[in-house]
Image (spheres, rainbow, N blue to C red):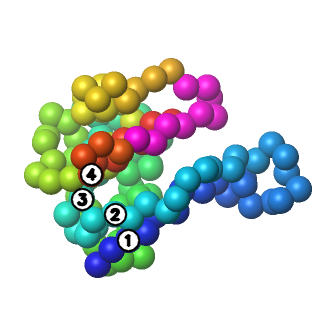
Amino acid sequence: MVLTLMMCSHAGIAAADTNALRPVGESILWRPTATYAILLSENPSTQDEYAADLLRDMVEKLSGAALSVLREPAVPPGPFVSLGATRAAHALGATVALSPDGYQIREREGNWYFQG
């Protein structure tokens, strides 16, 4: 089973809105989703916890795959989606200062790093 994840912002739907976010790029083809885990920092923010729950629930609804949510120092047994300022993201150099409405998405060796 493969899940195609389209990165978009609901604000980008209105064509007349010149300030809307308009992500550039292609759809992302994930490996089988059942192998992924969601990784949070040891002390995640409320927003990161909410994002992990939302991602887990939506992936399960869309694909039937039940992703586990782990907190560091736990190490995922396979590929993972890092949400927020995790040690894994810091080791990659994937944590930067963002504007209040900014976000960053990186991929490295099949692992995904989301911040913002």
Of callouts 4 and 1, the N-terminal one: 1
Q: What residue is disc 1 on?
A: 3
Amino acid type at circle 1 is Leu
List x then y, in percent, for residue 60. Answer: 35, 72
Judging from the image, what secondary structure is the residue with disc 1 in?
A: loop
Task: State which mark lies toward you, 2 or 3.
Answer: 2
What residue is rendered at 24% in x and 46% in y? Answer: 109
Give the farthest residue toward the front.
25
List x then y, in percent, for residue 14. Answer: 81, 60
What mark, if any, has residue 30 been given in the picture? 2
Residue 103 highlighted magenta (yes or no): yes
Distance between the alpha carbons at the discs numbered 2 and 3: 9 Å
What mark, if any, has residue 36 been given in the picture? 3
In the picture, measured across the screen, residue 38 lies left or right of residue 105, that is left
Q: Is residue 57 visible?
A: no
What mark, if any, has residue 51 been given in the picture? none
Q: What residue is disc 4 on?
A: 110
Does the residue at mark 2 contact the one at mark 3 (Cβ under 8 Å)?
yes
Q: Main secondary structure of the magenta part?
A: loop
Distance between the alpha carbons at the discs numbered 4 and 1: 14 Å
What residue is rendered at 27% in x and 51% in y? Answer: 110
Q: Nearer the viewer, residue 71 or 112?
A: 112
Q: Nearer the viewer, residue 85 or 21?
A: 21
| Residue bounds of the magenta highlight | 98-106
What residue is rendered at 63% in x and 34% in y? Answer: 101
The picture quadrant where one finds residue 115 is: top left
What residue is rendered at 15% in x and 34% in y? Answer: 73
Amino acid type at circle 2 is Trp
Residue 108 highlighted magenta (yes or no): no
